[in-house]
Amino acid sequence: MTTDRHTHPCLLPDSESSCAYVLIVTAVYWVSEAVPLGAAALVPAFLYPLFGVLKSSEVAAEYFKDTTLLLMGVICLAASIEKWNLHKRIALRMVMIAGAKPGMLVLGFMCCTVFLSMWLSNTSTTAMVMPIAEAVLQQLISTGIADAQDDSENATDTPDSGDCEKQEVCTLSEVHIASPPPKKPKIRRNSMYPTKRDHMICKCLSLSITYAATIGGLITITGTSTNLIFAEQFNNRYPDAKVINFGTWFIFGLPIALIMLLLTWVWLHFLFLGCNFKETCSLSKKRKTRREMLSEKRIHDEYHKLGPISYPEVVTGVFFILMTLLWFTREPGFVPGWTSLFEKKGYRTDATVSVLLGFLLFLIPARKPWPSVSSSQVKDDEESEEDPLAPMITWKDFQRLMPWEIVILVGGGYALAAGCKVSGLSMWIGRQLEPMNGLPPWAVTLLACLLVSAVTEFASNPATLTVFLPILSALSETLQINPLHTLIPSTMCVSFGVMLPVGNPPNAIVFSYGHVQISDMVKAGFGVNLIGVFVVMLAIMTWGVPLFQLNEFPAWAVMRNVTSSL
């Protein structure tokens, strides 16, 4: 240890201060977003070797981990779901079940988004569901304008009938599902929304989708990139802790998501649609207005346009279910999983399953292997006339969805963590935090949650978590509390950057549709943020305790403590 800690690390190459310097530089680039996040994550790759903290080959090894392979497999499946329009079928079907009453419509879209977001990234889920929601909203608006002018024939005309005298109806035909976010619909300014209530429904539905995508991402370990970052950093730091896997995370996350979903829906309903739940949520046929009938007709029409379920959709659905089942049964915890069938233990992870199934999607042809002359087969023939053996997905489909920036960002985080560990910086940080010794575990966790959810409003979620995880791990070890007690709630809370369009990409997508102002987002997001922190604290104090044995300081953390102080 040197006495002069404030000298520039280039002049005084003490390994701890060099590491702190690299950490600060990277953090500043991440928070300011002066360069793309992926590019900023490459800073440790050249600064660590230059300062002699880590060898170049050691840094490079940190950038590609097990989780990257897991993500690649999931993206292959997502590409297949998107290519064969399975997401559209699921979304429309769920909305058909929910009906067109505003309250139930919002709840239907939220449930559907939560379900999709469990498996796909929050961003791609929002990008998939938003165009469907926009089509429904456009229908509400155009039927509203038709009501006002009492001209129902034009409004209910289907877009492809070519009878597009009214601009409103034209905008409807322009909203293709899974198209990039359209500009503001080109309806005349004075009648953009027939009534204030319509505008409120638009706001409520738009915001509900971004919040539902965030909530859905909490349920599975692959639901959002921050969960993956946590799992990877945790397993790196505590290799002996075999507590975090797909099953345990799901059991912990599902109740959180269900409670949050309900509370968020009540909060948005109260904020935008008022307190009259009876009127907006009744399921009886008698109470339906003409406009609600037309909205339902619109959704049914969209669903019928998809035609009968095609062979590639069935294959994708089967893979989807298979991947989930294999993840669940790998090491469920309460019974021996399928890994116990193999002789060598610890070789297979969730990534193994994901990459295997992803690889098979490139292999399996998108046409039925047996001949049959049904309508869907004719359609398939037309599509793949060029190549009868065209696979379910091509490399292009995969490439289009693969978030390489996130992969490098996550890698940069591991590199920083490795540097902190090797140079002893994390120990030094832990020692500075010793004054917090007197606090009970729940207070430490609450402080961590509030701090993380405040920072994440302005910085990207992965960058925030990557900076905080090593600090919180060191803090937990110093205070002798189970590291999971602070790490899991912080990982969950980092997703609640929902108050600004810059907070996370789903917010930006929803904002780009133009129904919502920043003030609406801040107002609604503040409530969602508080709901989130409250539910996560509730979870870690109740069912989290027996699930992760949070009351004792575990042996794997003690081992880590001993080795790092040597």
Image (cartoon, grey):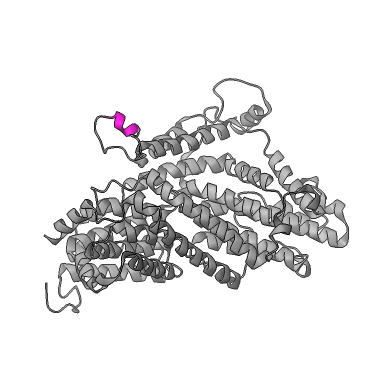
41 left or right of 199 in image? left
- Residue 340 colored magenta? yes
Name the quarter where the C terminus is drawn. Answer: bottom left
Q: Is residue 221 visible?
A: no
Q: Which residues are magenta?
A: 338-342
74 left or right of 317 in image? left
On screen, 565 above or below 217? below
Query: Residue pushed farthest top?
Result: 371
| Residue 272, picture quadrant | bottom right
Counting labels gives: 0
- For the point 64% across and 55% down, which residue is it? 106
Name the quarter where the N terminus is drawn. Answer: bottom left
Label the magenta part by its dominant secondary structure: helix
- For the point 48% across and 40% down, which residue is it? 77
User: In terms of depth relative to the viewer, which is nearer, 171 or 265?
Assistant: 265
Q: Report x, y in % for residue 492.
A: 42, 58
Q: Is residue 324 visible?
A: yes
Q: Report x, y in % for residue 24.
A: 29, 71
User: In terms of depth relative to the viewer, which is nearer, 498 or 171?
Assistant: 498
| Residue 165, picture quadrant | bottom right
Q: Report x, y in % for residue 82.
A: 55, 43
